[in-house]
Image: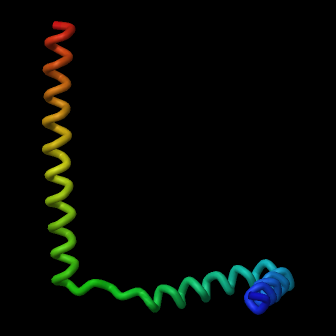
């Protein structure tokens, strides 16, 4: 437990010693390092995900349209 706390304190002191531009450069190096770890989908997986999203959006549009039409008719019935 003490090792983790001392490592965290050492990191804080190292971050405080860095200048503004060094911190910005470190940030971009870390971002690029993380982007290299990203696994991109294949063309087939991308097409499948695209169709899934389009289908889901269409279903939600139909649902919202039905609810909207129902509230519209209810409003006309109430306020005539």
Residue at image location 70% in from the left, 80% down from the top = 24
Residue that sits furthest to the front in the current view:
1
Q: Quarter of the image containing the C terminus?
A: top left
Up-down: is 3 above or below 49? Answer: below
**Which of the 4 image quarters holds residue 53?**
bottom left
Residue at 14 percent of width and 12 percent of height: 77
- Position of residue 53 in the picture relative to residue 9 (left or right): left
Q: Nearer the viewer, residue 60 or 25?
A: 60
Instruction: Kindly tell me whether residue 18 is visible in this rendering.
Output: no
- Place residue 4 in its image quadrant: bottom right
Establish if 58 lies above or below 72.
Answer: below
Locate residue 8 relative to residue 69 in the image: left or right: right
Q: Nearer the viewer, residue 68 or 47?
A: 68
Image location (x, y in percent) of residue 73? 13, 20
Q: How many marks?
A: 0
Colouring method of the image: rainbow
Could you tell me residue 22's position as x and y percent?
A: 75, 85
Using the image, determine if residue 60 lies above or below residue 16: above
Residue 6 seen in this snapshot: yes
Task: Look at 13% across and 44% down and name the residue there.
Answer: 62
Q: Locate residue 12, reporting x and y percent.
A: 80, 81
Q: Residue furthest top?
A: 80
**Quadrant of image for the N terminus:** bottom right
What is the x, y in percent for residue 32? Answer: 53, 87
């Amino acid at each position: 437990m003490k090792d983790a706390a001392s490592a965290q304190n050492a990191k804080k002191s190292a971050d405080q010693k860095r200048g503004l531009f060094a911190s910005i450069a470190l940030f971009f190096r870390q971002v690029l390092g993380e982007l290299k770890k990203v696994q991109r989908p294949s063309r087939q997986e991308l097409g499948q995900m695209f169709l899934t999203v389009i289908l889901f959006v269409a279903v939600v549009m139909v649902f919202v349209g039905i609810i909207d039409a129902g509230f519209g008719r209810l409003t006309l019935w109430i306020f005539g």
